[in-house]
Amino acid sequence: MEEWGIPTFYLQAMAFNYVQHLATRGIWTPDLAMAGGFSTEDHIFKVLAMGAPYFKAVCMGRALMIPGFVGDNIQAVLENKNSRNWKELPRTVSQYGSSPEQIFLNYSTLQECYGNKVKEIPLGAIAIFTFIDKLRTGLSQFMAGARSFRLDTLRRTDVVALTEDAAKVSGLAYIMDAFQKEAMEVLDG
């Protein structure tokens, strides 16, 4: 799948250039969303910062489906249903326990919100909720490090390109050039 079209990094750079071109001409610019294999909070941060101020969302497919499937498999094993995939909990799950309360970090959070109705929520949904909470926490930490406390305060200067080629493609500062003036001012200060 990674070889079927324009790589995500290039596609985002192109989309940013096109929408910025419209903006500089005073033409209305749409809010943009980016998809393309993103699965972690650092991916979300980089997409939104690289595309600032035009990119407003990051689309995630498989990254969210995987915990849903895992939660569904856990539920099938715990309820002694015929799971096509698992006969028992794998060690990577059973090391945390053998009940939803033990396995899912956010189970108690949902229990506080929904009381006993939490038992009616499929474990696949609880797994997705737990994964999204991990993304939220990690993204909040990255944003705090960048001193951006709302998504609309992210800037392109919050990320840098690690290679000269990436800098050329994206228009981001090359890491060896980024903030050199400010560094020299500190050193000469």
Image (cartoon, rainbow, N blue to C red):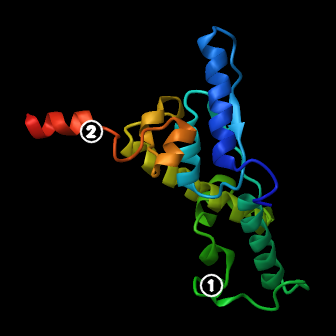
In the rendered structure, which amino acid carries the disc numbered 2?
Gln
Pinpoint residue 53: horizontal percent, then vertical percent.
Answer: 56, 27
Q: Residue at position x 27%, y 38% from top?
A: 180
Q: Is residue 48 among what the camera can see?
A: yes
Q: Which residue is labeled 1 in the image?
A: 92
Foreground: 44 or 187? 187
The answer to which of marks 1 and 2 sits earlier in the sequence is 1
Q: Is residue 132 above or below residue 151?
A: below
The amino acid pointed to by label 1 is: Thr
Q: Secondary structure at mark 2?
A: helix
Question: On the image, which quarter does residue 16 sit in?
Answer: top right
The foreground one among 63 and 122 is: 63
Name the image quarter holding the N terminus.
Answer: bottom right
Mark 2 crowd level (few <14, some 14–19, many ≥20, 10 Å Cα): few
Residue at 67% in and 57% down? 129
| Residue 88 % position (x, y) | 77, 91
- The answer to whether 141 is drawn above or below residue 3 in the figure is above
- What residue did someone put label 2 on? 180
Q: Position of residue 46 (x, y in %)?
A: 53, 46
Mark 1 element type: helix
